[in-house]
Amino acid sequence: MDEETRQNWDLIKTPLGIAWSGRTRYAAATFIYHRGEMSAEVLEVYRICSRLDAEDPLDVLTRWQIGADWVERMRAMR
């Protein structure tokens, strides 16, 4: 894994509640999406949550029953 990719995988796990953390996660999600590792539906949830620093995109995905494979992947990385 190259350095830019590793950095974006770290950034998508930015803790909730930190100022601008939602936008940070969304920027990383956009990078990962363009690599073909995330669906457009999952990216849209990250976009919606981007202005809500305390909102966990994984919780939203679970509630909306979208991207179960992504949620599982991310929770395994915690």
Image (tube, grey):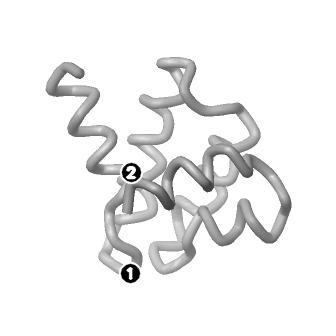
Q: In the image, what residue type sits under mark 2?
A: Ile
In three-dimensional space, the C-alpha distance between marks 2 and 1, rounded to whole angstroms, equals 14 Å
Q: Secondary structure at mark 2?
A: loop
Please say if 21 is above or below 29: below
- Left or right of residue 16, residue 66 in this image: right
- How crowded is the residue under tag 1: few (<14 C-alpha within 10 Å), some, or many (20+)? few
Q: Which quarter shows the N terminus? A: top left
* Residue 43 quadrant: top right
Q: Position of residue 70 (x, y in %)?
A: 62, 46
Please say if 71 is above or below 43: below
Q: Residue at x 49, y 34 (%)?
A: 30
> Which one is in front, 68 or 27?
68
- Left or right of residue 45, residue 63 in this image: right
Q: Which quarter shows the C terminus? A: bottom left
Q: Residue at x 53, y 48 (%)?
A: 73
* Residue 27 quadrant: top left
Q: Residue at x 80, y 70 (%)?
A: 63
Q: Residue at x 35, y 65 (%)?
A: 20
Looking at the image, is mark 2 or mark 1 earlier in the sequence? Answer: 2
Q: Secondary structure at mark 1?
A: loop
Residue 17: which disc?
Answer: 1
- Left or right of residue 19, residue 68 in this image: right
- Left or right of residue 38, residue 14 in this image: left
| Mark nearer the viewer, 2 or 1 | 2
> Which one is in front, 62 or 73?
73
* Residue 23 quadrant: bottom left
Q: Position of residue 29 (x, y in %)?
A: 48, 40
Q: Position of residue 47 (x, y in %)?
A: 60, 50
Q: In the image, what residue type sits under mark 1?
A: Gly
Tag 2 residue: 12
